[in-house]
Image (cartoon, rainbow, N blue to C red):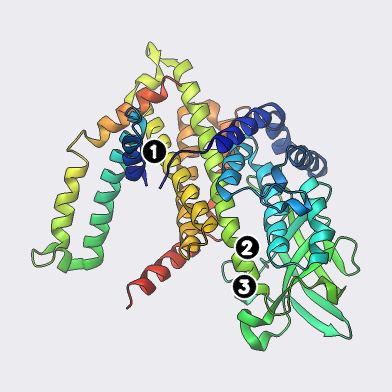
Amino acid sequence: MNYDLTPEQLSIKENFSKFCTKEIEPRAQILDHATHEEVDKLIKENIKMLAGIGYLGMGHDEAYGGTNLDLISQAIAGEEVAGACASTFLSCGASSGLFGVPVKLFGTDAQKKKYLPGIIKGDLIGCFGLTEPGAGSDAASIKTSAVKKGDKWILNGTKTFITNATIADVALVFAYNDKSKGPGTGVTCFLIDKGTRGFSVSKPFDKMGFRGSPTAELILEDCEVPEGAVLGAVGNGFIQAMQTLEYGRIGMATVCLGIAAKCLQYANKYSKERNAFGKPINRFQEVSFKLADMMILSDVSRLLIYQAAWAKEMKNPESAVLASVAKVWASEAATQISSMAVQIFGGYGYIKEFPVERLYRDAKLGEIGEGTSEIQRVMIAKDLIRKYAA
Amino acid sequence: MVVYRVAHDKDSGKPLNHMHTSIAKAIVGDWGMKAASDAVQIFGGYGYIHEYPIERFLRDAKLGQIGGGTSEMQRFIISRILSYF
């Protein structure tokens, strides 16, 4: 086992850090405070910029314009992007990850050819529609239905909390084609292009954090799609969704790590410059121990993310549970770390002029999105009980 | 992993990385105590009596936060290193 990054991975870290500090980070605060219309425009520009340096193609095959890099390299680049602007990470992740990965893994050649080059170049934006108003953690209870009529499928239902909904050119939508078969074989995933009749998008939500990444509902009213819109095969949808979310969990853990590392960077710098009682505040143990705790928590997050990424890369059967472990740890670490950062900044941490206020709001999503902390613990516990049952 | 990383540093002949060692010592010491305490709680009354090994784990775990440099000293070292960045 090796704990050193390769020279290539180190250079990815350096290049992304430089690019994001210069191009993305100065726009983070602007995006956070922008109106919904401005957000749609600005985030598209950010996606395009990052596509320009190859970020969206890191996990994709060379045949479609990607660079097919390992998951650890993706996490390294992702941490830098997320630290610069968590919203940008989320929108890129929803497009090339949550949308792009299932197309890569399960799509037909025609589907890959149609969508992946555009996604990788940032010309096309994708989104992933699983969650519904009445089905979050309990994803098997989705109500969206797909009925076969001749050589067409007719879809009805509503998907909610969909990242990129307002800017997406194409959506993946999961629907029951045969409720009697249950989720295992009764759910199918459909590719639905923007502009398809019966397919519309709601107004974006006003979120606490990640305000630079648009989130809205997808509405399907007798939405008619051809047979070729089925991703892979009929009945495979639920398994496709679960496998995709495993990657998504590593992604969500990575955005939390980016937020946490940035909080530590800001708080560390501030605590050296800010004086109280005649000395820099980092010379007070109450402050310095917070910094140490921030370092410990974020460093463990990073190791757990790399471990989960490595396991997935090695096709280790433990990879799903390791992704859950990384996600729970990194997200809960990020909420604690961002709270400590606000505390160290004092009054300045509580006003919008300073970035830790945004990071604090952004961090909370980590414990909710891509499977709540509670659901991760359910899965981790089930895995443990199963292992020790024999 | 934090412990293995320190071992890896040592095995590959690198100079001692105080950040790595202190992070490992602090988190493993503190979480060892938490895990042992949670285990006693799960065992309930049985976790509190000598017949089961669980109460011994809790007593043993406490040393992890004290011996070899207290958890507080590890945080002191980590914060001092951070102050150079």
A81 lies above or below A171: above
Residue A327 placement, left or right of A44? left
Residue at (65, 69) in percent of width and height: A240
Near-viewer residue (B19 or A178): B19
Q: Estimate the x, y position of residue B55 in percent, counting from the top left.
A: 14, 59
Near-viewer residue (A227 or A83): A227
Q: Given the current orientation, which residue lies at the most extreme left position?
A: B50
Residue A48 placement, left or right of B8? right
Q: Estimate the x, y position of residue B27 in percent, counting from the top left.
A: 32, 43
Q: Estimate the x, y position of residue A278 in percent, counting from the top left.
A: 38, 10
Cα–Cα span, label 2 and label 3: 8 Å
Look at the numbered disc 2 and give the secondary structure of its residue: helix
* Quadrant housing the C terminus of chain A: bottom left
Classify 10 Å Cα crowding around label 2: few (below 14), some (14-19), many (20 and above).
Answer: many
Cα–Cα span, label 2 and label 1: 30 Å
- Residue A125 showing in the rendered view: no
Q: Tags 1 and 3 in contact by the CB under 8 Å rule? A: no
Please name the residue that numbered disc 1 is placed on: A296
Please check whether the numbered discs 1 and 3 fall on a single chain. yes
Query: Residue flagged by tag 3: what amino acid is it?
Result: Ile
A212 lies above or below A381: above
Query: Residue flagged by tag 2: what amino acid is it?
Result: Thr
Cα–Cα span, label 1 and label 3: 36 Å
Query: Residue flagged by tag 1: what amino acid is it?
Result: Ile
The answer for which chain carries disc 1 is: A
